[in-house]
Amino acid sequence: MGEKLITPEIGTIIWTIITFVILAALLTKFGLRPLLQILEERERTIKDSLEGAERARAEAQESLRQNQELVAGARRETGAIIEQGKRDAETLRGEILAQARHEAQEMVEQGKRQVQFEQKQAMEQLRRQVADLAIQAAERLITRSLDEATQRKLVDDYVNSLAAMRPEK
């Protein structure tokens, strides 16, 4: 029997070929096609995963770029806000200084007006006192009898003193 296996017989060769063809057909129908479909599905899955990874990488780069733009914009905006704050502070400082100068000027003017008012009151009071003194002097003159030269001298002195007391304008 061992010799039959080594020497090929036509019947065995035909049956072997038929068995091989049937086995190949069965494997093709039930094994190879599903295996190819699984391999194609796996290839598609890998391809989709690679495309998804590429899209995710592109989206991540886009997100990174947008974030960098946002950060840069925020930095610019922060710088602009700081500069605006400095300008506003400087403007406010100038306004406060101008207002303080204006108020100081008003205080000086009010002080001058007060001094002028008090000066006028003092002059009025002085005039009243001078008038009272003149009346008293006149009473004394009337009570005394003076010669004409002495009376003239007293009146001239009084007029000169009144002219000296006149407020300067």
Image (tube, rainbow, N blue to C red):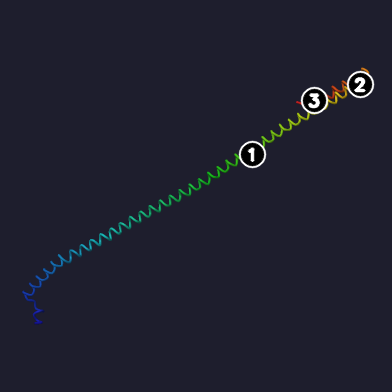
Give the alpha-carbon distance from disc 3 to disc 2, as whole Å. 29 Å
Residue that carries the numbered disc 1 in the rendered image: 100
Q: Is residue 51 above or below residue 143?
A: below
At x 13% / y 69%, what residue is drawn? 23
Q: Is residue 51 left or right of residue 95?
A: left
- The residue that label 3 is drawn on is 166
N-terminal of the pair, mark 1 or mark 2, is 1
Q: Residues within 10 Å of mark 3 (few under 14, many from 20)?
A: few
User: Which quadrant of the figure contains the C terminus?
Assistant: top right
Outermost residue toward the left?
11
x then y, percent, for residue 74: 46, 49
Q: What is the tally of numbered marks visible in this picture?
A: 3
Vertical relation: 103 (above or below) 75: above
Label 3 or label 2, whichever comes before in sequence order: 2
* Circles 3 and 1: CB atoms closer than 8 Å: no
Instruction: Please give the residue where the numbered disc 2 appears in the rendered image.
Output: 143
Do labels 3 and 2 touch, CB within 8 Å?
A: no
From the top left corner, tell me how far across and down residue 133 is, in percent: 85, 26
Tell which of 142 and 43 is nearer to you: 142
The mark closer to the camera, 1 or 2, is 2
